[in-house]
Amino acid sequence: MNLRVPKRKVEVQLCDEQGRIHRGDIFLSQNEASGASSQRVQDLLKERKFVPVRQHEKVWFIQAQRISWVKIPLLSAAAELDRHVETSVEARVNDVKVELVDGSTIRGKLRFLLPDSERRLGDYIERYEGFMPVRTEDDLYLVNVNKVIRFIPEVESGAE
């Protein structure tokens, strides 16, 4: 009997709440059943109190709530994005500057889909919990909304 759970390695950068950057690998559960989805980084951050990170062949653990953001290369981050939102012509796209408690900022895009009566950026960020996807040209940041001081809209547009 094989007790090993198939895992998928994802290379990430993590920023802790003190602004320190850590590089390493995290491992996500991979469902082998047809049609079943695999675990996402967002799922791991929600499910685990302490996230295991492998760095230089050693494993250490970081408290998920102490993470300000997780950065994933965009080409590796497709599973993190909501396909329905990504393919909808009704989706809203906002360019934002995100200011974090450690003094750092991230500039990127928020893409979301809400009912017509609630399509404003404020409606979206007000109801979001956990790690919000913020896309840059090359990377996807999963930003801990509890570490955000301000979202500053830079340019508002409709669907991309």
Image (cartoon, grey):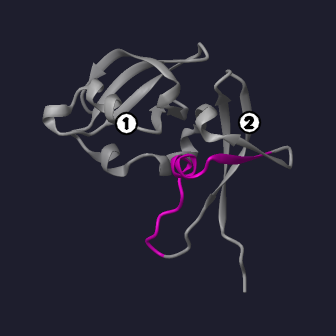
Of the numbered discs in the image, which one, if any, rests on residue 136? none
The x and y percentages for residue 38 are 52, 62
Q: Position of residue 79 (x, y in %)?
A: 49, 52
Q: Nearer the viewer, residue 141 or 103?
A: 103
Q: Nearer the viewer, mark 2 or mark 1?
A: 1
Residue 128: which disc? 1
Kindly check if marks 2 and 1 are in contact, taking CB atoms under 8 A apart as contact.
no
Image location of residue 128, percent across then percent down: 37, 36
Badge 1 element:
loop
The foreground one among 27 and 103 is: 103
Q: Is residue 52 left or right of residue 150?
A: right
Q: Is residue 136 visible?
A: no
Residue positioned 55% across, 32% down in the render: 138
Query: What is the magenta range?
Result: 34-54
Residue 41 vs 6, above or below: the answer is: above
Residue type at mark 1 is: Tyr
Image quarter where the N terminus lies is bottom right
Q: Quadrant of residue 104?
A: top right
74 or 20: which is nearer to us? Answer: 20
Does any portion of residue 158 appear in the rendered image? yes
Q: Residue at x 19, y 32 (%)?
A: 118
The amino acid on which the numbered mark 2 sits, given as a three-letter code, is: Arg
Question: How many numbered marks have been drawn onto this rendered protein structure?
Answer: 2
Q: Residues within 10 Å of mark 1 (few under 14, many from 20)?
A: few
The answer to whether 67 appears left or right of 133 in the picture is: right
Look at the numbered disc 2 and give the secondary structure of its residue.
Answer: strand
Between disc 2 and disc 1, whose residue precedes? 2
Tag on residue 23?
Answer: 2
* Quarter of the figure with the C terminus: top left
